[in-house]
Image (cartoon, helix red, strand yellow):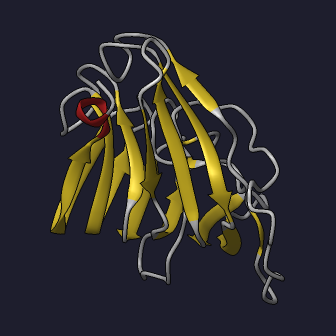
Amino acid sequence: MRPTLLAPLALAAVLLGTQPASAANTPGTPPASTTNTPRAQPASATAQPTAPGWEPAPSASWDVGAGVRCDFPVHGEPVVDEVEQRVLSTHPDGSVRRVAYRGDLVVRVTNTATGASHDADVSGSAVVEHRRDGSQFWAVRGPVLVGVGEGLGSLPRGLYVVDGVFTMDIGADGFKDVRLVHGTTDDLCARID
């Protein structure tokens, strides 16, 4: 999401974190996701037809161990997933340079030690620029799920719904620099502790 902002996007991936936010820097990966696992099929039973130029970009379920994001192990699973992506530009070698994401996404985040859960609406929109060195630049509008490892972000270690207008610069080393223009952060670890 770099130069422009789009309508709602659901990245569940959520910018979680280990790649980060997405995952593997390829379309269809959970933008901002907690792991680099491939995305699963949409969780929504009533998927809407895709508009021309847009294609489905479903999110995968993910797990992180105790101490990685929260003090306890966490599982995330999309319960509504209507995310779409559109490639806006490519590098000279044909790899994706800039891609837009939009669509409804609700992720159930569960403390697997206690069973406490919270359904996080992360139906934001984003344009993600994939740089040649593996880093990414996100321009975001609306809520997105962001996972931050210890010492790997401008936010403390945790799992957050970041809502509003913001950018996120993800270094090749995985460091996430979140810059809120206007918005809020919701600590999901505290919600499911």
> Dividing the picture into quarters, in which one does residue 93 lie?
bottom right
- Which residue, as the protein is rendered here, is positioned at the far bottom? 52
Coordinates of residue 177 in the picture (x, y in percent) = 25, 45
Coordinates of residue 53 in the picture (x, y in percent) = 79, 84
The answer to whether one can see residue 102 in this image is yes
Q: Nearer the viewer, residue 178 or 144?
A: 144
The residue depicted at 29 percent of the width and 63 percent of the height is 163
Coordinates of residue 106 in the picture (x, y in percent) = 54, 56
In the image, is residue 20 above or below residue 3?
Answer: above
Number of numbered discs = 0
The residue depicted at 64 percent of the width and 39 percent of the height is 24
The residue depicted at 69 percent of the width and 70 percent of the height is 84
In the image, is residue 131 above or below residue 181?
Answer: above
> Dividing the picture into quarters, in which one does residue 155 lie?
top left
Screen quadrant of the C terminus: top left
In the image, is residue 84 above or below residue 53?
Answer: above
In this rendering, would 35 be left or right of 176? right
In this rendering, would 4 be left or right of 29? left
In this rendering, would 115 be left or right of 22? left
The answer to whether one can see residue 11 in this image is no
The residue depicted at 57 percent of the width and 61 percent of the height is 105
Q: Nearer the viewer, residue 34 or 80?
A: 80
- Which residue, as the protein is rendered here, is positioned at the far front? 115
Coordinates of residue 111 in the picture (x, y in percent) = 43, 23
Q: Nearer the viewer, residue 108 or 128?
A: 108
